Image (cartoon, helix red, strand yellow):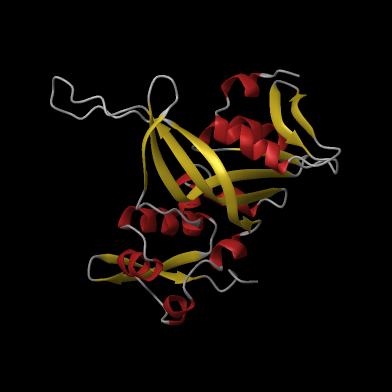
Amino acid sequence: MSGIGVLREGPLHAAVKDLLASPGDRAEVKFGRFVIDLVRADGELVEVQTGGFSPLGPKLDALLDDHRMRIVHPVAARRRIVRVDAHGEVLSSRRSPLRGGVLDVFDRLVSFPSLLAHPNLTVEVLLCAEDHIRAPEAGRSRSGRRRRDPGERRLVEVVGSEVLSSPSDAAALLPPALVAAGAFTTRELSAALGCRMVLAQRVAYCLRGMEVLVDAGKRGRAPLHALARTALA
């Protein structure tokens, strides 16, 4: 079946979907007004989402209460930037210093952080080695900005995965030493996780939405977070 999803998917999406498929699974299945990437033989609905999660909102609203659903989100743990010419011949390649991890999923969970508490939802983060295929550098625009081809992501291999099926799974990603210290600021969370400040802000926002973190007052002007007593229950 050539569904709407097939027409819009990129090479990374297609490769991950093929990798996930097992005997008895069905791809691109029509569910009312929606098309599901993969329907497992046991009935689980699987959606591969390489970008933001907000487009999944209507699908989750319509289907989640009656069906087990899994969002599979590929993250580039290792990436190589490959420049190709118009004929697809490789001009250059280099390793990117950027390395993603499971925490990157919080960039996407900001769309609906509390939904991870739903008993039918699982989020699986696939840590991947990827090639980012791009055209040659195109110089600069009239405004002086460098033109950059966003290219496309291609799967090389899956190097690991992390499954989040409840708020307690998300809570387990917090550094134990930070939790043991009691209340902490977002900046301290950023340092403990070894991530940029904006990502730490999203982690804190999502964990508050899941009621994993609670307000613990302020230190100066900085709001304090603390682990909720029920977070690891």
User: Which quadrant holds residue 172?
Assistant: bottom right
User: Which quadrant holds residue 151?
Assistant: top left
Q: Nearer the viewer, residue 91 or 12?
A: 91
Measured along the vertical axis of the image, is residue 1 above or below residue 111?
above
Measured along the vertical axis of the image, is residue 152 above or below residue 4?
below
* Quadrant of the image containing the N terminus: top right
Measured along the vertical axis of the image, is residue 2 above or below residue 13?
above
Q: Nearer the viewer, residue 9 or 202?
A: 9
Residue at x-position 18% and y-position 25%: 140
The answer to whether residue 53 shows anywhere in this view is: no
Report the side of 216 relative to 72 (left or right). Answer: left
Where residue 59 sits: x, y (%)? 65, 31
Measured along the vertical axis of the image, is residue 114 above or below residue 3?
below
Residue at x-position 48% and y-position 69%: 174
Report the side of 180 relative to 149 (left or right). Answer: right
Report the side of 8 relative to 101 (left or right). Answer: right
Where residue 153 sits: x, y (%)? 48, 36
Residue at x-position 37% and y-position 56%: 201
Total labels: the figure holds: 0
Where residue 170 sits: x, y (%)? 56, 61
Residue at x-position 64% and y-position 57%: 163
Q: Nearer the viewer, residue 112 or 148?
A: 148
* Quadrant of the image containing the C terminus: bottom right
The answer to whether residue 182 shows anywhere in this view is: yes
